[in-house]
Image (cartoon, helix red, strand yellow):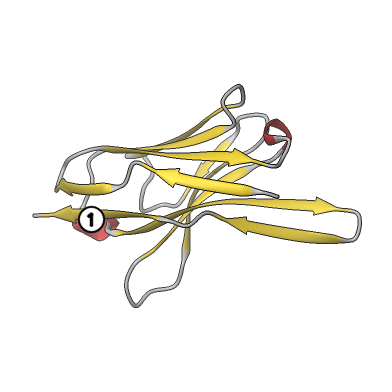
């Protein structure tokens, strides 16, 4: 089955950096777009960044210029490099992939990794 396992979250000071990783299994990783979402307490889950199978990236306005999404198809892993972190970046970050196959559309999530930015 499809599994997404995030890692790399933690506690960091305002202005610091973290790199999140998401290791995928159970899919032909290279053919799928991948995405990072986040959910802060009391807020809806929001799209942070996505990357197509060809490497095209897109970002939420709130993270443009600070976050970078990348992928390593040889390692079946997608990354989120987060620089100049702000207090408002505090959230649980989730990896996401959507599979569209004959018979349906399937959405998969990782378990999430907590990112906490402190002042």
- Give residue 96's position: percent from left, percent from top: 57, 52
Residue at 41% of width from left, 52% of height from top?
A: 61
Closer to the camera in the image, 11 or 45: 11
| Quadrant of the rendering where the C terminus is positioned | bottom left
**Which residue ends up furthest to the right in the rendered image?**
102
Specify whether 67 is left or right of 60: left
- Count of residue discs: 1
- Residue 21: which quarter of the image? top left
**Which residue ends up furthest to the bottom in the rendered image?**
42
- Give residue 42's position: percent from left, percent from top: 34, 78
Specify whether 16 is left or right of 83: left
Residue at 70% of width from left, 40% of height from top?
A: 32
- Residue 57: which quarter of the image? top right
Assign a secondary structure to mark 1: strand
Residue at 61% of width from left, 26% of height from top?
A: 73
Residue behind mark 1: 116
Residue 52 vs 60, above or below: the answer is: above
Specify whether 1 is left or right of 14: right
**Which residue ends up furthest to the left in the rendered image?**
119
- Give residue 84's position: percent from left, percent from top: 22, 41
Characterize the local packing of mark 1: few (<14), some (14-19) or many (20 or more) Cα atoms within 10 angstroms. Answer: many
**Which residue ends up furthest to the top in the rendered image?**
74
Specify whether 73 is left or right of 104: left
- Give residue 1's position: percent from left, percent from top: 70, 50
Residue at 67% of width from left, 49% of height from top?
A: 2
Closer to the camera in the image, 85 or 24: 24
């Amino acid at each position: 089955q499809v599994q997404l396992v995030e890692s790399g979250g933690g506690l960091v000071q305002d202005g610091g950096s973290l790199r999140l990783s998401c290791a995928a299994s159970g899919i032909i990783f290279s053919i799928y777009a991948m995405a990072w979402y986040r959910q802060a307490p009391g807020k809806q889950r929001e799209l942070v960044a996505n990357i197509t199978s060809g490497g095209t990236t897109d970002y939420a306005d709130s993270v443009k210029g600070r976050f970078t999404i990348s992928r390593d198809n040889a390692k079946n892993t997608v990354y989120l490099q987060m620089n100049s972190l702000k207090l408002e970046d505090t959230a649980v970050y989730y990896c996401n992939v959507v599979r569209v196959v004959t018979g349906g559309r399937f959405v998969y999530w990782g378990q999430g990794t907590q990112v906490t930015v402190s002042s």
